[in-house]
Image (cartoon, rainbow, N blue to C red):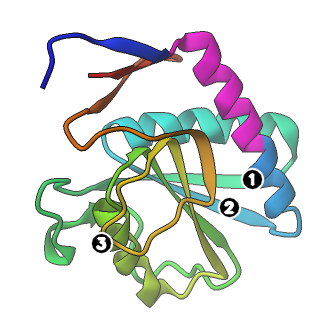
Amino acid sequence: MSDKKLQILDSAAITQKVRRMAYEIVEDCYDDKELVLVGIEPNGYQFARLLKSEIEKIQNQKVELFPLKIDKEQPNIQTIETTLKENQTLKSKTLILVDDVGNTGKTLFYALATFTKMQPKKIKTAVLVERQHKRFPVASNFVGLSLSTTLQETIIVEFNGKNGVAYLE
């Protein structure tokens, strides 16, 4: 891995991506009374907070936000933690699983398995940066930036409050 960082998204670009993705979500889920955003901690949750804020500016729609903890290196359904409980009904709700970077699909795959028992109306995924190295059959429905990279390169997203930046390393 190189010590060089190449900035691929600055704060203004991330703000624009969030706004565009929020409009896409509102258009796709226009008939849904409630949306449930689940952000994969830490950065996916920060990104989901930004999406929630933008969606609420666009449309008067109830948006719930929940964090999800998962070990991205070794995801395991038994070790996934969320404050969204199995007894909460999602049958009439659309769930959007949010992460900062979509890489192999492994994290989203295991995280999605957690919510299938809750039988939501729909499940969608949103990522800020999508890489093209899928090993698991998970496609992102809402994508800020799609980027072809080498396997040796890494995408790093950093959030500081409402500001964020993304690097290719």
Magenta stretch encompasses residue 21: yes
Which mark sits nearer the N-terminus, 3 or 2? 2
Horizontal and vertical percent for residue 129? 48, 39
Magenta extent: 9-22
Which residue has dot 3 on it? 110
CB-based contact (under 8 Å), mark 3 and mark 2: no
Of the two numbered discs 3 and 2 in the rendering, the one whose residue sits closer to the viewer:
3
Find numbered disc 2 in the image and state the secondary structure of the residue it sits on. strand
Q: Mark number for residue 35?
A: 2
Where, quadrant-wise, is the C terminus in this rendering? top left
Find numbered disc 3 in the image and state the secondary structure of the residue it sits on. helix
Which of the two residues, 133 or 50, is positioned nearer the viewer here? 133
Which of the two residues, 109 or 63, is positioned nearer the viewer here? 109
Q: Mark number for residue 25?
A: 1
Q: Name the residue located 41 percent from the left edge and 66 percent from the top edge.
A: 84
Residue type for callout 2:
Leu
